[in-house]
Image: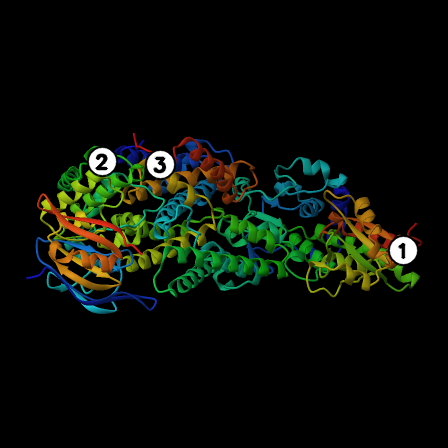
Amino acid sequence: MSQLIVDGVSVEIEGRRLVDQVLLDVAPGQFVGLVGPNGSGKSSLLRAIYRVLKPSAGRIVHLGDEVWKVSARQAARRMAVVAQERMGEFDFTVDEIVMMGRTPHKRLLDTDTAADHELVERCLGQVAMRHCAGRLFQSLSGGEKQRVLVARALAQQPEFLVLDEPTNHLDIRHQLELLELIGRLGTTTLAALHDLNLAARYCDRLAMLCEGRLVAAGTPAEVLTAERISAVYGVEATVGEANGLLRIDFRLKQQ
Amino acid sequence: MKLTLWLGAALLSMAPAIALAQATVYPLTIQNGDNTLVFNKAPERAVTLNGHVTELMLSLGLAPKMVGTAYLNHPILDSLKAEYDAIPILSDGTGSPSLEVVLATGADFTFGRLSAYRDTAVAPVEKLKELGINAYAVKGTLIKGATMDDVYEDIANIGQIFDIQPAAGALIERIRGEIGAVEATIARAGKPPVKVLVYDSGEDAIYTTGKALETQLIALAGGVNVFADLDETWSNVSWEEAVARAPEVIVINDYGQTSAADKIALLKHDPALASMPAIQNDRFVVLPLPSAFEGVRNPDAVRTLAAGFYPELFE
Amino acid sequence: MRIPLALLLPGLAAALALSVTLAVTIGPVNLSMLTVWNIAWAKLSGSTGMWSAAEENIVWMLRLPRVLLAALVGGGLAVVGVAMQAVVRNPLADPYVLGVSSGASVGAVLVLGGGWLGFLGIYAVSAGAFAGAVVSFVLVFLIAVAGGRLWPLRLVLAGMACGYSLSGLTSLIVLTSENRELARTAMEWMLGSLGGTAWSDLGLPAAVLVMGTGYLALSGRKLNALLVGDETAATLGVDVGRLRLRLFIVLSLLTGVMVAVSGAIGFVGLVIPHVVRMLVGTDHRRVLPVAALLGGVFLIWVDVAARMSFAPIELPVGVITALLGGPFFIWMLATQRWRSKDTA
């Protein structure tokens, strides 16, 4: 039984097809990585899944419901998103940002309860940002911001996490810590990643996109073959193994 | 002045032929433009909201009934100064007093130009009515093409409202008589009317008058306003149009910061105007603006204008 | 530094009550505080006392309704300013950013100059202004929505475009009018004034303010999410399109009513929201109630200045808000760390 089914989904903007009839399954508890070069349609596919870009064809079914047919609130209680939207001129404190994760769980007259505050603290603790709770979000470094946004997603207590390049702006330690954390949470996760080594190391399964089409899906070892990387990314790659992990090296193709 | 007025009023009231001399029967209804005023008795506490209105009320001997004056933007007539100084001044020559200040006098009647009854000046007449104040507006400010008859109507109305018809009748007769004397002099001479341009102000264009009292004052003084056909009371007209109408005399409205001499100099030094008969013959009449407003100074205006139009008749 | 809400809200409520009671004792006519309060108390309790009808009228018919309207309009403009900044996600937005004051001016000038709606008597100008405000909102909405969704930038641009066109229309009407007083009356109206307020003028703004602020405060969480970004708000369960449409309607109604009763009073809706954010942060559930109270207190005192500084002649209150608001804002910018690195 799959938690998320992407069934022949296409996304078009102004006549350009960004995602082309993609089929994808995510099973409960899996950490699925979406890989592919820039412009391959990773973000567009994710945006179709989290209800920002309406697909021109196909269905996206999450937990038995088509995501484009449930209410925004219901969708947000099941699915949390860490995307790459730049925040505007207005600033919130870190704990206020994380508290926003409770929005889909609140009705009109509900206030923030002690339990909500505890949850916010716990989520900040999970990303090692509890010491920054009172600081202004804009005053944080890129990596710190990313971790706070993950904490906000956790505060949504979702059954499904969608992450768009979550390791951008993070230094190596925080990249590892973040992906480690997501693996440890056990929440079903679909994440666009551009670092193939990290994807291979932390994801249960990978799906590779190229020019909007799904070119491969399976275990990291099945997807990340030297030939496929060479074809999709236009570089020469060697895939080896070290300490039981896939290890991929790249160099430019010789003319 | 006051004494002679009262004397005249007393004499007139004895003459049964004067219909105005009948005592007012209250409640009295007065129609003032769209506004219907009902007086259950003569007002006891009157406030005047403009200088020429203040002079009119004082000339009717109403000083004892006046509890405030406002917006006098020229010196008061010498003959009225003593009485004027005894009445509280609610605002000086720069604007209308606020409603609160008018209310604080305990006023039951106000008299002023329509502009005093703007929302941003004192208050609209409806609002004053709610507060128990009968607000009367100068008729000449409510209509286009005001004449001396409208001034007489205001005076007669005030006479009725305050039950002083004899004094009102006397004042009307005095003004009518003074203006009539000038008219008679001109009529005897039998000359065609002089073409007159009113220069109020303006550099890019001339701010002049069309259908306002000043046009009739000019007519009474034996002139004709070249812009009498304007459909507005006051308006800007182009220099070109003014030249085309070839005025023989220019009336300078004298008030405010720019002196009459400066205005005349401006007109004389404009080469575009050189062909105008009034400029070629150096014919200017300086009219103190307060005398062009509805009130007791109107005969002065007619005299000043007539003397300017026909110097040989008024030496 | 943030002040705890538990202190700030009761403090501001007390300041508002105190401001109302003090402001009615101040006016060009000198009345003792005791007289003023006795009159107010007598009116409320139905008793009588030793004062003239003129004094009673000044306190009860002129000053008190005016002070209360100042509080309502100040609170309303501040609240609308806060929400408008969230709707268009722009710190420079104020209640008039969508061109509403220009629309209201056209309506008011048509009434002042052309005598439209004459059958409404002294309410004609307010009615004209409200109609103009609504028309401009509908125009802005139609232009902005033509692109599909109500994007913040499209809203602002549509508002600016309509604002310029409608200002031009106002100037055209004023300049070609036969009424030579119109330029002055129109300018005074556009600057905003609270003069001539009667008790009957208070009902509608009070009702609209209470309902509007209530709705906005209950939507506080969603406004927070909206301020972060449309996409983020959507992933947090906010139906962004529907929310922005509803906010648009609520804000139109609020601004339209405020403009109709007081003209276009500037700066309150821009400055107060920023001052409040400096005091309590950005969370709308705190900002909105604080802004409503602070805006009320602020405009009460600005109106006192408008009444008193050139007494017995009154200035339009908008002149004072502009004169005070500008330097005050500059002072805030200079002394506060605008985007401080830390709240400590």
Chain identifier of the residue bearing label 1 in the image = B
Local crowd at mark 3 within 10 Å, few (<14), some, or many (≥20)?
Answer: some
Is residue C81 depicted above or below C180 in this figure? above
Identify the amino acid type marked 1: Gln
Left or right: residue B25 versus residue A160 is: right
- Image quarter where the N terminus of chain C lies is top left
Q: Nearer the viewer, residue C195 or B40?
A: C195
- The label shown at residue A11 is none
Give the secondary structure at mark 3.
helix
Direction front: furthest residue: A255
Residue farthest top in this picture: C344
In this rendering, would B287 be left or right of A125? right
Disc 1 secondary structure class: helix
Residue C312 coordinates in the image, percent (x, y): 56, 39
Q: Is residue C111 above or below residue C43?
A: below
Q: CA distance from mark 1 to mark 2?
A: 87 Å
Q: Nearer the viewer, residue C298 or B193?
A: C298
Which chain is disc 2 placed on?
Answer: A
Residue C278 numbered tag:
3
User: How many residues crowd mark 2 within 10 Å: few (<14), some (14–19), many (20+)?
Assistant: some
Q: Nearer the viewer, residue A88 or C107?
A: A88
On the image, the x and y values in percent for residue A198 come to: 17, 47
Query: Which residue is pictured at 24% across the width and 43% down the height?
Result: A146
Residue B84 placement (x, y as % from top left): 68, 38
Seen from this angle, which residue lies furthest left? A1
Type of amino acid at the residue the image marks with label 3 = Met
- Residue that numbered label 2 is attached to: A133
